[in-house]
Amino acid sequence: MFPTYDVIVVGAGHAGCEAAVAAANLGCKVLLATMNMQTIAQMSCNPAMGGVAKGQIVREVDALCGYSGIVTDHTMVQFRMLNKSKGPAMWSPRAQSDRMQFALKWRYMLEAHPNIDFWQEMVNGLLVKDGRVQGVRTGMGLEIPAHAVVLTNGTFLNGIIHIGEKQFGGGRAGESAARGITEQLVELGFEAGRMKTGTPPRVDGRSLDFSKMEIQPGDDPVAKFSYTDTPVLREQMPCHITYTNQKVHDILRTGFGQSPMFNGRIQGLGPRYCPSIEDKIDRFSDKDAHQLFIEPEGRDTCEIYINGFSSSLPEDVQFKALRAIQGLENVKMFRPGYAIEYDYFPPTQLQLTLETNLVKNLFFAGQINGTTGYEEAACQGLMAGLNAGLAVKEQAPLVLKRSEAYIGVLIDDLVNKGTQEPYRMFTSRAEYRILLRQDNADLRLTPIAQRLGLHGADTRMDRVRNKQQTASEIETFFRNASVSPDEVNGYLASVESAPVVQKVKLYNILLRPQVNIDSLAQALPELARFLAPFETEFVELAEINIKYEGYIRKEEEMVQKMNRLENLHLHEDFDYRALSALSAEARDKLARHKPRTIGQASRISGVSPADVSVLLIHLGR
């Protein structure tokens, strides 16, 4: 009934969809298995993509020929570039999405790919022989053969939904949990754990009084995520902001006795940086109010997402508390918030390719690895799909360095440090933030996509070359063109910058912190005429290269130093326990992780700089 697939992807969430596309773009024959074809690429929680550090990840996925950025551009209803008041290393794109259109666009694009087939059924087991995965087994007992398998099960592995004192099996509201895979993996020797996440109630927008809330409009002009020719959003929808208050907090406290979080029914740890509303008012009892974002679910629905009000309290307590919020006095609730507890597998059991240590050609991606967030899942899916395809083709794997991408930071953190709570990406996790900006993801990663032969990479590289050449041309103009005091001092006074007393290069003017290229061009007609033909993104790149040249060079020097450690390879059979000079913890951790390089060893939790020195001495360095 089934051919032998190159890659089978289990689960069609954000990780699964990107994994399927990545392997298919390598030319592999892929089967995407999902319990429900109607929930492909479902936005299970908030209807948004991107955010701080997450937006950088979406652009990196796009630069590697993934689809998340393209789908977001086609279906967004609002766009904002976060942190514009800070330096470019912190700029992070975020889009409010139309939930239904997002999933629909993903399905259209997947179905349009000739290398992707689909199967709707629960996968409850793996076919494993001699330590190598051979395919999957379904709930009906069908055996589907494959050379590689990527598991992207999300919150479905033995998922339990909690609402107050009620609990029932499920991987998402209205959908069954997946059973069988955890048990088999544990039998194979994998360590499993439990984690928890949650979601807010959904409400009827027709019952809200938006006039009592702060309006939060999108950016003008609107930017986008994908480096391809996707449409620019023309008509944006506003979001709104309101706040909890002391009365809301008092109502919520009445339900604490029935809270599964507080009475011990939930064992798994939840995301530290996205706590439930009951957790917020318990941990931050000194605060009188917490901010809530009122976000539309799409253009053609009145459903509203209450961002910041995630809860697993009884539904009647949630409802009463919502009605005590300004603007929500007459709210009608579509469904309550809930917490969900699910199985995950500590990611220290993986290689940097996301292949498991115990089973050859078996890959994990997404929440099964202990992460949280669509973007974190999508980039893992992309990397697992690429490496599964490369393994099948017997080609060298792709491992991104921490200096190459946020994706590299995320996977390196997971594999070397592990996580006991849902892992979320932040800019602070990256040592080389000025190199890993959202504006240059294509320059960093599209050459890799072309080298791998990914479908569509050649066309993308044409734009990358044009971008590099244009930025270089603009930088050269600024280094060579001069401006007189008469031409520029009026502008400098307007931005409270010191006047010049003689002709100076435009380059030196742009270096001033008060000066930006847009306002400078408005003051200098000749500069405006020169810049007019160029895309805004290309001009922005040139400005960043000029203003942050010293910082960029300093980080590149740091990367070179670190790469020396990355190039010092450790043999897989290295006997760490024989090195008595290592700390006991380092011997244990190194023997368990089996790092490939000194650089990787240095990032394992519990391995100190002194331990690294011992390894360097042992290698004769």
Image (cartoon, helix red, strand yellow):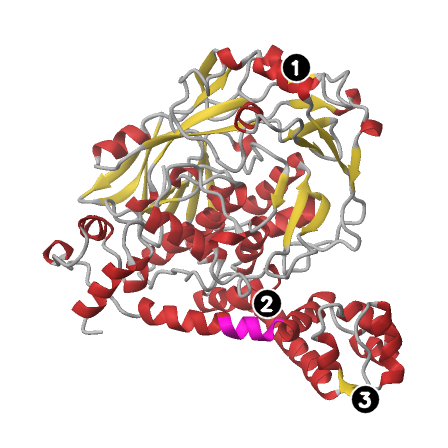
Q: Is residue 67 left or right of residue 570?
A: right
Tell me how far mark 3 sits from mark 2, CA to CA.
Answer: 46 Å
State which mark lies toward you, 3 or 1: 3
Q: Residues within 10 Å of mark 2 (few under 14, many from 20)?
A: few
Q: Residues within 10 Å of mark 3 (few under 14, many from 20)?
A: few
The numbered dot on residue 216 is: none
Q: Which residue is mark 3?
A: 502
Residue 281: % across, % down = 57, 25
The answer to whether residue 164 of the structure is visible from this angle is no
The residue drawn where x is 80% and y is 37% is 215
Q: Which residue is mark 1?
A: 319
The residue drawn where x is 66% and y is 76% is 471
Amino acid type, residue under disc 1 in the picture: Phe
Amino acid type, residue under disc 2 in the picture: Thr
The residue drawn where x is 50% and y is 38% is 13
Residue 185: % across, % down = 27, 34
The numbered dot on residue 459 is: 2
Quarter occupied by residue 543: bottom right
Is 552 within the magenta? yes
State which mark lies toward you, 1 or 2: 1
Q: Are marks 3 and 1 in contact (CB under 8 Å)?
A: no
In the picture as drawn, the residue positioned furthest to the left comes out as 578
Which residue is at the front of the view, 329 or 106? 329
**The N terminus - image quarter:** top left
Tell me how far mark 3 sits from mark 1, CA to CA.
Answer: 68 Å
**What is the span of residues highlighted in magenta in the rendered image?**
548-554
Q: Are marks 1 and 2 in contact (CB under 8 Å)?
A: no
Amino acid type, residue under disc 3 in the picture: Gln
